[in-house]
Image: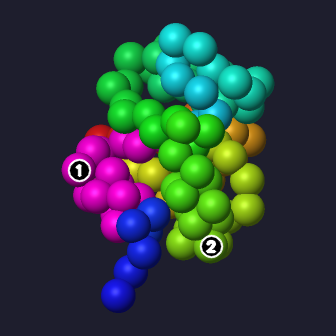
Amino acid sequence: MTSPGIDKIEKEIKSHKVVLFVKGMPEAPQCGFSAATMELFDKMKVPFHSVDILANPDIRLELPEYSKWPTFPQVFINGKLVGGCDIVHELHESGELQKLLK
């Protein structure tokens, strides 16, 4: 039996191609790394679904264990963890992020 937080996480990553688990919302980010990650996807004109972990304490608590990634933001593409802010920006610069989004 899974917890409600894990159920929510799985529902989000299965329901959307690109999911960003961030601090805040696109209109009001609460963290510079979250803001930079959302700005990157906006600049690329890639639609994404964001989940505010500050408003979802169960997700904030359980996502690091689920994904085996300790920090936020966390970016999932096609149901798989891609990484956080630095990794997503590095993948963008190398052209790999664009390939993952196709």
Query: Which of the numbered marks, if any, corresponds to residue 15?
Result: 1
Residue 71 is left or right of residue 37, and the answer is: right
The residues bearing labels 1 and 2 have C-alpha atoms spaced at a distance of 20 Å
Residue 28 image-quadrant placement: top right
For label 1, the SS is helix
Instruction: Work out which quarter of the rendered image holds the C terminus and state it.
Output: top left
Residue 31 on the magenta segment: no
The three-letter amino acid code for the residue at tag 2 is: Glu
Q: Is residue 18 magenta?
A: yes
Reading the image, the residue beneath label 2 is: 65
Q: Nearer the viewer, residue 7 or 101?
A: 7
State the residue in front, 68 or 100.
Answer: 68
Q: Nearer the viewer, residue 12 or 56?
A: 56
Q: Callout 1, which amino acid?
A: Ser
Q: Given contact means CB atoms under 8 Å apart, are the residues at marks 1 and 2 in contact?
A: no
**Between 54 and 14, the one nearer to me in the picture:** 54
Q: Which residues are magenta?
A: 7-21
Q: Position of residue 31 (x, y in %)?
A: 74, 27
